[in-house]
Structure formats: structure tokens, C-alpha cells
């Protein structure tokens, strides 16, 4: 990876893109420190500190890079954009016009992107209004009046829209997927603080017992490295479906007869199932936190089960029942999202039109059934692998009460985006080499 970056900096065009991306990231981090005008930051910091036991807000804090708890102009960050993108993906199944746009190639993609922007701004405005009303009378606003509330709504909405624009600019003029890179820099910004928390909790108290402190440090590093390795293996694992193309006459020449393959990623849905499952389970917890009243009895038990921080705690084993729901949701969303993004019928038809076939499988419907069978198998394997990666830090947090904002989900996003960005840089370097060869 370091060699790739070193070689990339020697190429003027790519160096400009890397510098532009870096400058945009600096802008993001500076904006994360700017407070929203008219808000009482001390109130919100104290409120957020009281919610540290709530796993839902740890998840949100990681995704916003701490901007939410500081109530900066980027407090909402790109979460409205992520939500709107998910909504557009789901609506493309139900609305024929959106499905048509998906099939129209680049033009259709631009139209969907335009609609996604409008939905993002609308969601950001809605969330800003809800936060201003919900927290305004509790102490968030320095002065409770219409003008002050409007200022907060406009600042939060504009901040989210600006980050969306920055992400698109990085995609266009920088390297990698801009929205993913914005999300990654937010997560990475929280890691030093979380590592400091872990060090202070498991190493510093044992400074007089060097062996124990060293063992704890080794365990922390081993868990992080194990999670990273599992993510890399899961991200690169693919199932190759062989395809044989028949020979045919073109003019006076016999062409075709080539062998190829369809690469099916084991983790076909990426980190989306985890984000969906975590978001769905965090909604009831966030509502309870906003209301300010903790339910008692069976209601309190159910909310406790939904909180990831309560899982694997020996003192309260009943809360770990929520883990079963979490795993079921991850597997369900893995199948659901893959069914949206990969169409076996369409793939089988394309293979048939191009004169190809899977060895031992007849073209048409049998090929579709074969692809479905293979896909169902690898989706399940990928979902189980994804669950294991996510649960490693959760187990550690539950058994040792190590509450940090980053976890398996964050590591999956970081590793996946970094690997994808490096591949894109390498492909741009290869394209430039080809151009240079042709010019010569």
C-alpha cells in the first residue's frame, strides 16, 4: 500500500487528486469543530455524556466523527445522505419509473443522484427541526425563540448538504468514493480517543504490575488485528462461476470459444446489512433517550435487549437474547440487499444472448436456478462471516465493559474503503501507463 502511494505521488495527475482529497478532509475536520450558532454546547455535551451507556449513540457518534456530541455544524453529517440512498434503493423496487432509471445507464444514474440530493436535504431539514424542537426547550438553545431555532435548523441542514457536496467533489476530482471517504475520516477521527479510553481502562491501572498491563495490551492489539484480518479475508473472498462461450462465425473467421467466469463476492452486500440491523435496533433506544423517560418492567427489559452494550454481560444474561434478533436481521438484510443489487435472471439472459453457458448447466431457466442456488449459499456464508467480525468487539465490550464508539462495523467500513481506494489508484496508474505506451 505504501509503495502504491509513493508511486502515485510521482504522477502529476494522481498527485493533484490525492492533494485535493486531503484538503477536503481537512475542511471536514475543521467544520466538525465549528459550533452551531445559538446553541448551548455544554448542555448537549452533558446530555450526551449521560447517554454513554446507550449503544445507539455510540454508533451514531462514530459515524459523525464526534460532531453530533459537540453540536457542530456537521452534527448530522452524511447520515441523511446514507438514509436517502437506502430509501432510493428500496423505492426502485416498488416504483417502475425509478427501476427504468436504474437501467438507463449513466443518464439514469444522474437522474437518481439528483433525486437523492433533494431527499437528503429534506431529511436533513426534518431531522434538524426534530432536534431543535426536542432539545430546544430542554436547554439546547441559548434563547428559545423562532429566529434562534431557525438558525439552528438552517445551520444543521446546510452542514449536511455541504458534506454531501464535498463527497461528490472528492468522487469527481479526487480519489475513491467521496461519501465513503467522508464516513471513514469521521470514524478514524474517533479511534485515538477510543484507544486512549481502552489504554486508560486496561493498561494504566496496572502500571505497577507490568506483566498484567502487557498482557492486556497484547489482548487489545490481538483483537483489533484479528478483526482487521477477518475483514480483509471476507472482503476479498469470491466464488467464481465458470462460463464457456461457444464458437461462431464472423465473416470468414471462427471466433469465440473462450472461457471466463462470473465473480460473486462472498460478502455480496458489504457492510449494508450491519448498518441496517444496527439502525433498526437503535431507533427504539433513541426515541426513549429523546423522551427522557426510561421504561420499566418488560418495556425496560426489551430496550435493554436492544442495547449492544448489554450483550455478553455475565451479570445480566437475559439481555443477550437481543443478540439473536441482531443476527437474524443481519442475515435477512444480507439476502434482501443482494436481491436488489444482483438479478440472476438478468445475468442468465445476458450469458445466453452472448452464446455462453455454465459448464454442466443448460442455458436459460436452469442457469438462473443454478445461480440462485450458489448465491443463496454464499450469501449465508458471507452473512455469518460478517456477524463474526461484528461480534468480536461486542463480546470484548460485554465481558470487560470496554465501551468504545468504534467496533466491527467501523473496522469493516475502514478496511473496505481503504482497499477499494487503493485499487482505484492502482487502476488509474495502469490506465496512465497504457496511455503513455500508446502515445509512444
Image: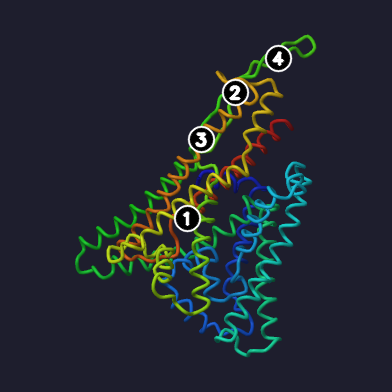
Disc marking residue 238: 3
User: Does residue 245 sit above or below 229 in this rendering?
Assistant: above
3D distance between C-alphas at marks 3 and 2: 15 Å
The C terminus lies in quadrant: top right
Residue 163: quarter of image: bottom right
**N-term mark: 2 or 1:** 2
**N-term mark: 4 or 3:** 3
Say left or right for 135 vs 202.
right
Disc marking residue 243: 2
Residue 256: quarter of image: top right
Disc marking residue 409: 1
Tag 4's secondary structure? Answer: strand
Residue at 55 percent of width and 71 percent of height:
67
Q: Residue 438's x, y, as percent?
A: 72, 30
**N-term mark: 4 or 2:** 2
Residue at 67 percent of width and 76 percent of height:
155
Packing grade of label 3 (10 A; few <14, some 14-19, many >=20) is some
3D distance between C-alphas at marks 4 and 2: 16 Å
Q: Nearer the viewer, mark 4 or mark 2?
A: 2
Amino acid at each position: 500500500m505504501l509503495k502504491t502511494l509513493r508511486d502515485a505521488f510521482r504522477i502529476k495527475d494522481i498527485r493533484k487528486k490525492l492533494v485535493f482529497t486531503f484538503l477536503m478532509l481537512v475542511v471536514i475536520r475543521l467544520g466538525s469543530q465549528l459550533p452551531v450558532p445559538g446553541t448551548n454546547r455544554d448542555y448537549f455535551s452533558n446530555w450526551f455524556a449521560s447517554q454513554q451507556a446507550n449503544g445507539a449513540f455510540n454508533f451514531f457518534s462514530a459515524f459523525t466523527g464526534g460532531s453530533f456530541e459537540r453540536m457542530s455544524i456537521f452534527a448530522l453529517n452524511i447520515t441523511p445522505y446514507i438514509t436517502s440512498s437506502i430509501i432510493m434503493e428500496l423505492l426502485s423496487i416498488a416504483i417502475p419509473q425509478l427501476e427504468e432509471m436504474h437501467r438507463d445507464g449513466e443518464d439514469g444514474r444522474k437522474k437518481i443522484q439528483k433525486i437523492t440530493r433533494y431527499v437528503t436535504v429534506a431529511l436533513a431539514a426534518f431531522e434538524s427541526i426534530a432536534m431543535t424542537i426536542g432539545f430546544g426547550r430542554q436547554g439546547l438553545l441559548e434563547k428559545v425563540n423562532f429566529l434562534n431555532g431557525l438558525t439552528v435548523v438552517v445551520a444543521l441542514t446546510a452542514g449536511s448538504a455541504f458534506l454531501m457536496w464535498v463527497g461528490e467533489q472528492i468522487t469527481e476530482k479526487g480519489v475513491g468514493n467521496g461519501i465513503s471517504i467522508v464516513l471513514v475520516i469521521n470514524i478514524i477521527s474517533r479511534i485515538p480517543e477510543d484507544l486512549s479510553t481502552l489504554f486508560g481502562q486496561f493498561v494504566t491501572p496496572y502500571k505497577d504490575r507490568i506483566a498484567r498491563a502487557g498482557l492486556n495490551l497484547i489482548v487489545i492489539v490481538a483483537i483489533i488485528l484479528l478483526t482487521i484480518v477477518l475483514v480483509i479475508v471476507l472482503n476479498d473472498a469470491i466464488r467464481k462461476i465458470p462460463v464457456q462461450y461457444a464458437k461462431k462465425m464472423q465473416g470468414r473467421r471462427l471466433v469465440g470459444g473462450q472461457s471466463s467466469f462470473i465473480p460473486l463476492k462472498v460478502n455480496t452486500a458489504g457492510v449494508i446489512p450491519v448498518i441496517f440491523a444496527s439502525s433498526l435496533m437503535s431507533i427504539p433506544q433513541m426515541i426513549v433517550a429523546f423522551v427522557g423517560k426510561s421504561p420499566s418492567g418488560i418495556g425496560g427489559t426489551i430496550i435493554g435487549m436492544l442495547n449492544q452494550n448489554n450483550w455478553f454481560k455475565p451479570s445480566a444474561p437475559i439481555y443477550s437474547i437481543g443478540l439473536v434478533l441482531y443476527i437474524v436481521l443481519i442475515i435477512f438484510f444480507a439476502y434482501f440487499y443482494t436481491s436488489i443489487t444482483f438479478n440472476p435472471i438478468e445475468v442468465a439472459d445476458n450469458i445466453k444472448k452472448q452464446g455462453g453457458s455454465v459448464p454442466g448447466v443448460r442455458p436459460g431457466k436452469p442457469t438462473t436456478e443454478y445461480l440462485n442456488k450458489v448465491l443463496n449459499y454464499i450469501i449465508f456464508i458471507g452473512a455469518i462471516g460478517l456477524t463474526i467480525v461484528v461480534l468480536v468487539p461486542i463480546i470484548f465490550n460485554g465481558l470487560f465493559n470496554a465501551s468504545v464508539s468504534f467496533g466491527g462495523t467501523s473496522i469493516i467500513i475502514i478496511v473496505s474503503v481503504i482497499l477499494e481506494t487503493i485499487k482505484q489508484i492502482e487502476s488509474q496508474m495502469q490506465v496512465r501507463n497504457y496511455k503513455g505506451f500508446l502515445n509512444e
